[in-house]
């Protein structure tokens, strides 16, 4: 085992990062969804694998609405989509959802969670910034710049400073998080390789990257950068030495003032920062900013592979629940993608269209692999890396709480409304859902739902109060007002599961209600409870 | 070039499908090397053996003083006013504040040589609950979560990990934390009451309807699960399957179920009552219970604080040992006393002792640990370790080993192997039976 690892590690060093030859890729003018279809299908055929069937319309609108705007669709929305005979209806739906304020809110929450330091999912600190950034359809490159080089005097960037603020007291974390989040590489990850060469490799890279942040300081609540400063470290072998600023690609960077300042210089620099602090103004930037240098270097041709592929992989993972490269922070030659050409093509498209996030999102959700069913009958499904079958995604706390709200509201209250009024109502429901969302855990890859959630649903009054009320405007009130139990059941299934009830369900639920005619109100409540706590509402499938 | 690690994602995935999740409750991301390795001794036998192991941790929050407990220095300038007394281990003396434990050290191993280098409440507590520091991108599971995963069972009718922390001081600094194992292994935390949340049925539903409503839920979910494969989906169904059993475990938290004579033994203090609940829980098969007792942070009036709190610790710990022994549980249950750090030998101007992580004490009792042992040594004033220095890592490796768990066992985050203790960390063999 160990000996293999050593070999691997050695090979790892010899393998340069080999991009696919651009000449062999599909033409750049191909649409994104077609490129995805092509490459995913190609590999399935090559390996003689059968993908799942395409999902039906009801599943597709549910999936798209959850993924794009963070909630299940209302029964009316589902009905309209399923009934539509328009051959372009999916494209229209996607464009409609992506143009709605809900899209901004949900994607901002997703980016906020993505940017949270390990262990505190979705602090909400960056939500405000991402809301504004997505509203303006800022490019990923611009967002990276805002977060790395925040300008507090620019109202359009409000809140972007939070990324550095959350990490400025721990520059190791800042170094690692920037590498992981923006470049898809975890510079602290080589621990399992005990190869002395790799240790050196790791250290040089780590301290090389950290060199870009070494001058970053908290200056009385704002983030400032000193004019000077050099990082020294003690390698595993040998004595302490200064680090060389180094990008992940191995590109060594000449950094002005990468030395210890003279006492005169230091004094002057200190005065500059003290003045900022005293005036409570945003810090005046240094003559040469190391962080600005990193931004420049990271986007240089030859180096930008890391940046380009990392965002493609992150967005792919957001919608497929599984990366083109897994785990997301291990994008290196030892862990190649299953579809290298596809990753290459999408990264090229990203650059070619000025890092337009919406463009890639739209391309992904219009692709065929995204539209596959999550059911795979008969044999074991192909490995997730083939994207042959849709992956179940546990809802985020907010998705779950808002969906629970929509599911248990009288469907009539979403009907015959102007789009603005409906949007307002949804936003109100989101506000009302926040409290409950705080009781649910944020899912991660291969997330396991704990018993605390099941106990909460089973025995906590809040579930009853928030979702099982029978007052005006609730689903249960509406069910109790139905002419017969069959209609009540059909209503509940449409509202909670976003699809028509099956005969089997109608039979089963009618039996349940039939046995409890002496306490029919409770019976309805129990029925709704069983549905909202079941797996079908818990997942985006 | 073939990938050489097993435990890759696809391995775990198929293995899970094959096992149906019956034996291994963990996520595919955290596959278990030993079960894939045909050369390892029978995983089944190991599992069954481990099933019986339990841990009760008495968490002395804020930092109990080693000088007023297990490593007194009477007569030294740092010694403070209390004397030491002879114990049932020849040549070993502990503080006079612990007369009951002085008669029971034959069951206990005292470690006087912890050097853990972290004197901060928050990160110190994190370190001593995990046996290592979190990394920037890895939030490690704590001891309770790892034992829940190693010794709990997917279909268990009792909780896997229970944590009492009733006082408010320092509670936020040392929460139970499943780290990357995720909420499946999160503790059942008891802060405000002796009874966990959400175990009792609400008014307005009968026992029968509660059961049948749950059956209906399961039926609907089963239908949904047809032809779908997902670790998370499996865990969702498992979580709900455990609800009824856990509700039945409610009486474990109710000390009124114990005879008055047993309750009298533990005494009327909250700490005593929670220790009694902990015993009830481990007896019923809960792998890990932590009983937090705060607040030992005696920067001022160190001696009054310890005069008040140490006798209670002495009593509770001694009672727990007697009770477990009487029930035949001591050989499979380990009692750990641990803080985030100890206290300075130097006495400050407020007659207090400050944070100190360079030479302090902990104890291990029962399950796989040699009793009657006093390991390691601090110097005459208690300022540094002069013999058998131990850090958090080797303490944890020793605990795992005593419980029959291989400390080098690996979990996987994606394809990155993460052993239970950091590479190179070794247990202290001489403490093991």
Image: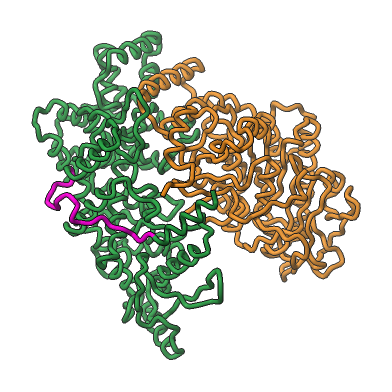
Chain colours: A green, B orange
Viewer-closest of B359 and B100: B359
Where is residue A444 drawn, in percent x and y?
41, 43
Prevailing SS of the magenta stretch: loop
Q: What span is colored magenta in the figure?
A: A15-33
Where is residue B236 drawn, in percent x and y?
44, 31
Where is residue B302 drawn, in percent x and y?
74, 61
> Is B35 above or below relative to A215?
above
- Identify which residue is drawn at 52% across, 27% down: B22
> Is A373 above or below relative to B122?
above
Q: Quadrant of residue A167?
A: bottom left
- Identify which residue is drawn at 35% across, 65% down: A249
Does the image show residue B394? yes
* Left or right: where A501 falls relative to A269: left
B364 drawn magenta: no
Viewer-closest of A44 and B79: A44
- Identify which residue is drawn at 47% across, 77% down: A242
> Is B43 above or below relative to B431?
above
Does the image show residue A152? no
């Amino acid at each position: 085992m160990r000996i293999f690892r050593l070999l691997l590690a050695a090979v790892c060093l010899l393998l340069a990062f080999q991009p696919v030859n651009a000449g062999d890729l599909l033409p750049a003018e191909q649409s994104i969804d077609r490129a995805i279809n092509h490459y995913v299908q190609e590999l399935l055929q090559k390996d003689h694998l059968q993908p799942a069937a395409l999902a039906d319309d009801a599943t597709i609108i549910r999936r798209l609405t959850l993924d794009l705007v963070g909630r299940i669709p209302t029964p009316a929305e589902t009905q309209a989509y399923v009934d539509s005979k328009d051959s372009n209806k999916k494209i229209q739906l996607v464009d409609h959802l992506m143009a709605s304020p809900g899209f901004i809110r949900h994607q901002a929450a997703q980016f906020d969670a993505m940017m949270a330091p390990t262990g505190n999912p979705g602090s909400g600190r960056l939500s405000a910034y991402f809301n504004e950034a997505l509203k303006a359809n800022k490019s990923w490159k611009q967002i990276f710049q805002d977060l790395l080089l925040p300008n507090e005097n620019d109202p359009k960037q409000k809140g972007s400073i939070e990324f550095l603020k959350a990490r400025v007291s721990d520059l190791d974390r800042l170094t690692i998080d920037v590498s992981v989040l923006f470049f898809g590489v975890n510079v602290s990850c080589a621990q399992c390789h005990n190869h002395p060469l790799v240790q050196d490799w790791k250290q040089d890279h780590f301290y090389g990257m950290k060199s870009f942040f070494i001058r970053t300081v908290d200056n009385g609540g704002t983030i400032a950068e000193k004019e000077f400063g050099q990082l020294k470290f003690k390698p595993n072998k040998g004595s302490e030495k200064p680090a060389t600023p180094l990008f992940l690609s191995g590109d060594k960077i000449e950094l002005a003032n990468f030395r210890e300042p003279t006492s005169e210089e230091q004094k002057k620099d200190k005065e500059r920062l003290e003045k900022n602090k005293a005036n409570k103004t945003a810090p005046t930037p240094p003559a040469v900013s190391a962080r600005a240098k990193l931004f420049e270097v990271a986007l240089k041709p030859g180096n930008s592979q890391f940046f380009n592929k990392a965002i493609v992989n992150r967005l792919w993972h957001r919608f497929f629940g599984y990366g083109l490269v897994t785990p997301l922070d291990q994008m290196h030659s030892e862990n190649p993608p299953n579809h290298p050409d596809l990753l290459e093509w999408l990264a090229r498209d990203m650059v070619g269209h000025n890092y337009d996030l919406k463009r890639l999102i739209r391309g992904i959700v219009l692709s065929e692999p995204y539209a596959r069913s999550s059911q795979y009958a008969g044999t074991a499904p192909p490995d997730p890396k083939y994207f042959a079958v849709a992956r179940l995604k546990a809802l985020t706390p907010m998705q779950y709480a808002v969906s629970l709200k929509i599911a248990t509201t009288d469907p009539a209250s979403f009907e015959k409304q102007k789009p603005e009024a409906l949007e307002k109502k949804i936003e109100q429901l989101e506000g009302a859902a926040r409290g409950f969302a705080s009781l649910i855990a944020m899912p991660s890859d291969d997330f396991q739902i704990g018993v605390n959630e099941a106990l909460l649903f089973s025995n906590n009054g809040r579930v009853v109060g928030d979702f099982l009320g029978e007052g005006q405007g609730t689903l249960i009130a509406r069910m109790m007002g139905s002419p017969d139990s069959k209609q009540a059941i059909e209503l509940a299934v449409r509202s909670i599961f976003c699809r028509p009830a099956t005969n089997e369900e109608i039979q089963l639920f009618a039996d349940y209600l039939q046995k409890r005619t002496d306490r029919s109100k409770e019976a309805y409540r129990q029925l709704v409870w069983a549905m909202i706590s079941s797996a079908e509402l818990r997942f985006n499938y | 070039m073939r990938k050489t690690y097993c435990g890759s994602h696809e391995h775990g995935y198929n293995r899970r499908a094959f096992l149906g999740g019956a034996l291994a409750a963990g996520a595919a991301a955290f596959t278990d090397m030993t079960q894939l390795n045909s050369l390892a001794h029978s995983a089944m036998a190991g599992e069954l053996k481990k099933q019986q192991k339990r841990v009760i941790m008495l968490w002395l929050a804020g930092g109990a003083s080693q000088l007023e407990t297990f490593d007194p220095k009477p007569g030294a300038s740092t010694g403070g006013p209390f004397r030491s007394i002879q114990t049932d281990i020849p040549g070993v003396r502990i503080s006079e504040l612990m007369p009951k434990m002085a008669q029971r050290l034959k069951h206990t191993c005292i470690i006087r040589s912890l050097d853990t280098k972290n004197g901060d409440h928050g990160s110190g507590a994190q370190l001593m609950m995990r046996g290592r520091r979190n990394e920037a991108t890895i939030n490690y599971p704590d001891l309770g979560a790892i034992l829940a995963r190693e010794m709990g069972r997917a279909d268990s009718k009792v909780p896997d990990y229970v944590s009492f922390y009733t006082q408010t001081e320092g509670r936020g600094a040392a929460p139970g934390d499943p780290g990357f194992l995720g909420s499946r292994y999160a503790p059942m935390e008891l802060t405000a009451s002796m009874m966990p949340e959400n175990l009792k049925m609400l008014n307005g539903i009968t026992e029968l309807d509660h059961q049948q409503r749950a059956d209906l839920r399961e039926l609907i979910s089963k239908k949904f699960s047809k032809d779908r494969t997902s670790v998370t989906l499996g865990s969702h169904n498992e979580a709900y399957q455990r609800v009824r059993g856990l509700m039945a475990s409610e009486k474990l938290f109710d000390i009124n179920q114990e005879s008055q004579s047993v309750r009298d033994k533990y005494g009327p203090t909250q700490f005593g009552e929670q220790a009694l609940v902990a015993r009830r829980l481990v007896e019923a098969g809960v792998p890990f219970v932590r009983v937090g007792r705060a607040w030992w942070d005696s920067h001022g009036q160190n001696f009054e604080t310890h005069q008040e709190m140490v006798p209670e610790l002495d009593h509770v710990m001694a009672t727990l040992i007697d009770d477990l022994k009487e029930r035949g549980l001591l050989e499979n249950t380990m009692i750990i006393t641990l803080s985030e750090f100890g206290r300075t030998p130097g006495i400050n101007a407020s007659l207090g002792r400050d944070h100190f992580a360079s030479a302090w004490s902990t104890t291990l009792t029962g399950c796989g640990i040699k009793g009657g042992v006093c390991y390691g040594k601090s110097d005459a004033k208690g300022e540094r370790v002069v013999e058998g220095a131990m850090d958090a890592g080797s303490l944890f490796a020793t605990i795992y080993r005593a419980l029959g768990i291989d400390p080098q066992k690996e979990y996987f985050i994606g394809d990155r192997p993460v052993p239970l203790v950091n590479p190179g960390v070794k247990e202290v063999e001489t403490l093991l039976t």
